[in-house]
Image (spheres, rainbow, N blue to C red):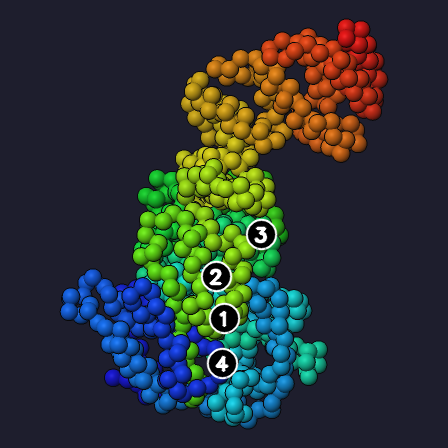
Amino acid sequence: MDIPGKVSTKGFHDHHHDDFILPLIDGKLSSSLVDMEKLLYVSDSDNIFPIGMENFRRKNISSPNKSPSKQQLTKEEIKNKVREKWRSAAKKLKYIKDPWFEFHIQDYPVEKVIRHRYNPVKKEWRKDECFVKMEPKQFANGAMRACFRLKKLSNFSHHKSWDHASNYVAKCYKDSSTERSRYFDDVRVQMDAKFWAELFNRLNPPKKVDIMQMCILEFNERPDSPLYHLEHYIEGNYIKYNSNAGYVENSIVRNTPNAFSHFTFEFSNHELIVVDIQGVGDLYTDPQIHTVNGQDYGDGNLGVKGFALFFFSHVCNEICHSMNLTKFDLAPSELKDQKSFLEKIKNQPAATRVKNKNGFQHSSFNYGLSARNRYLISRFSCSDENDLCEIDESEGYSSASPCLSPGIQIVPCNLSTLTRSNLAGMNYLSKSFNSCFSNNTSIVDSPFDNEEAIRFFNSNDYNKPRASGVVEEKDALLNADTEYREKIIRLETFESILGKVHLELCKYHEIGRFVANENGQFDEEAAFFHLQLAANLGVTDALVNCAKIYMQIPHDILPDFKVEENDANFEIGFDLMIEAAEKGEKYSLIYVAKAFDTGIGLSKSREIDWSRATEYYRKLIGGNSEEKLCDDGFYDISSDFDPVYTILARLGHIYLEGGYGVEKNPTEAAELFNEAAERAMQSGKGRLANKYYDLAEQANSLS
């Protein structure tokens, strides 16, 4: 039985308890179903799908679970069913009362304001004017912002009746000292997230998602021209599905929110991930975006650490699988304990975390830190400006089934021409993903038009998603075409973002973030598992530390972890050391150079090779580049390493003697001895400089 004044949602829920919410936009009002029918359909092969109505069906019309007779519906029958549903919705809409009628907002004075809207494709702001009436007293507030009821006339309305004006919520920061730029940053986060929501919908997931449209109102007729965030007002059960620091709502079975976050990671080429998913049903608000460099989007952007925290608690679900998203690699012990771990954090606070320079604060699943772990925090990059502290941004009002003013238009959602059946068996969706930006795709309630999106995606690599699995990632890096490889190198400076995520997970294990109590021991095997994966993807820090572990050399990460000491492990470590040296890491360069030079520390399968030693010596000193020298004549390397004049002199001796793959070359030796003498003199080593000058003369006499 329908409740008067409410839109009945009976029968609109699936087994995941997902509430379908029609997006609300400030558009042209129309009560004509004929006009809306022009927007209702897009075709896919032989089927016609009603835009925005697919979520009203309990099961897909062509579901194999239905009887053969029910599957054979004609296109006209499908249209008739959809028309009937729209007529029913329109009748109910006619009798909906304005939920804010009793507050008489229409009686407040009219104010002309400047509206600032952000276009996430063009990365630009647009301004226009509009008219609003706002209640002077706040009706709700959260930890950071106060909320005010507001009505706004549509700029496209043919009448100026405030009885038909849309209901909005205006939010402002309680702290009057908040910088105005923060309001604009918040809008950019939300509108960029809305952009990714639209991309997600184009791949036709079981449930469409949407991010509430958000803009800024500047009350320029008031003193100091205060700013307010503006969002449509909706009401319903407000739920936080995940946070920006790994929290996952586990009491309600929901697949879509976390699959959406996973999607943004892969389809952004690992450059970002949209998290902090909260709202009503699949209408979200106040998301957060982590980026690979940790910059932009405010203090809630935790960078690669945020990626790591998400994937530690993320369990791939049916939607992830249907969209061919790749499972993130976790250690066997982590997979075994993941379910119980999620149960432990279920009742922990889901608040958003922000970077805090004043000290480490516990996160939603950090139960305490031992003295040793506090020491580790001071060493690792997961402290300093990337410490986390808790904020609560719940705004005191909930947001989902629409409460609309009479006459407001319900605009149907868009449906991509790309279906899940098109994606079966595909690891990379470049061709199919490109096809979803066809001119047949309708974009509704979008801050950008279809042509802009087409141009944007045709000129970027966002149509080339990258997997979350290490095997797939390494295969993609090895087999990438030249243009794509150059883009990756430029983006990552020769290091895999996915590898960096695994390195952060290793560090988080070591500091005890995933330990249930302060006295518990962290999972060393799991930490080493992630360290190895990071090394496998070429992350320099992981390569060096893994090499040292295998070679029984003291190391910084997991300093107490050891592997069996044998020739096979030493060989593995030496290979890793060479790989790190190829990437220019200073310790690895000096180690392998001296090993090939003297045979000390060389694996048993290799022999002294002066040609390789000279290669690494020269790479270490940077090709005699003056700009890499410090004022004292040393290169910018650890004080444990030899000064540059010593390395130059050793190269001189190699060319003077010849052998082990290097031809004797007295002329080259003389030049190296002379350069070594000059550098020694600059460092105040006069006697040593004279020795090098003598050696240079001897070499010249042999040339």
**Disc 2 marks which residue?**
196
Residue farthest to the top? 702
Q: Residue at x 23, y 64 (%)?
A: 63
Residue 317 position (above or below residue 520):
below
Q: In front: mark 1 or mark 3?
A: 1
In front of the other: label 2 or label 3?
A: 2
Query: Could you tell whether 52 is left or right of 486 in the image?
Result: left
Count of numbered circles in the view: 4
Q: Earlier in the sequence, mark 1 or mark 2?
A: 2
Compute the Cα span from label 2 to label 3. 19 Å
Judging by the rendered image, the residue that carries numbered circle 4 is: 27
Give the CA distance from mark 4 to mark 3: 36 Å
* Residue 475 vertical placement versus 355 (above, below): above
Q: Is residue 37 in view from this perspective? A: yes
* Residue for point 71% across, 32% down: 636
Residue 221, position as x, y percentages in the image = 68, 84
**For the residue carrying disc 4, how many other residues have a C-alpha within 10 Å: few (<14), some (14-19), or many (20+)?**
some
Seen from the viewer's position, the closer of residues 597 and 267 is 267
The residue indicated by pointer 1 is: 446
Mark 4 or 2 closer to N-term?
A: 4
Residue 407 spot, x, y in % from top left: 43, 88
Residue in front for this viewpoint, 78 or 263: 78
Q: Nearer the viewer, mark 1 or mark 2?
A: 1
Query: Which type of secondary structure does the marked residue at label 3 adopt?
Result: loop
Mark 4 or 3 closer to N-term?
A: 4
Residue 294's disc number: 3
Name the residue nearer the viewer: 42 or 128: 42
Whole-Å distance between the Cαs marked 1 and 2? 11 Å
Which one is earlier in the sequence, the residue at label 2 or at label 3? 2
| Three-letter code for the amino acid on which mark 2 is drawn | Trp
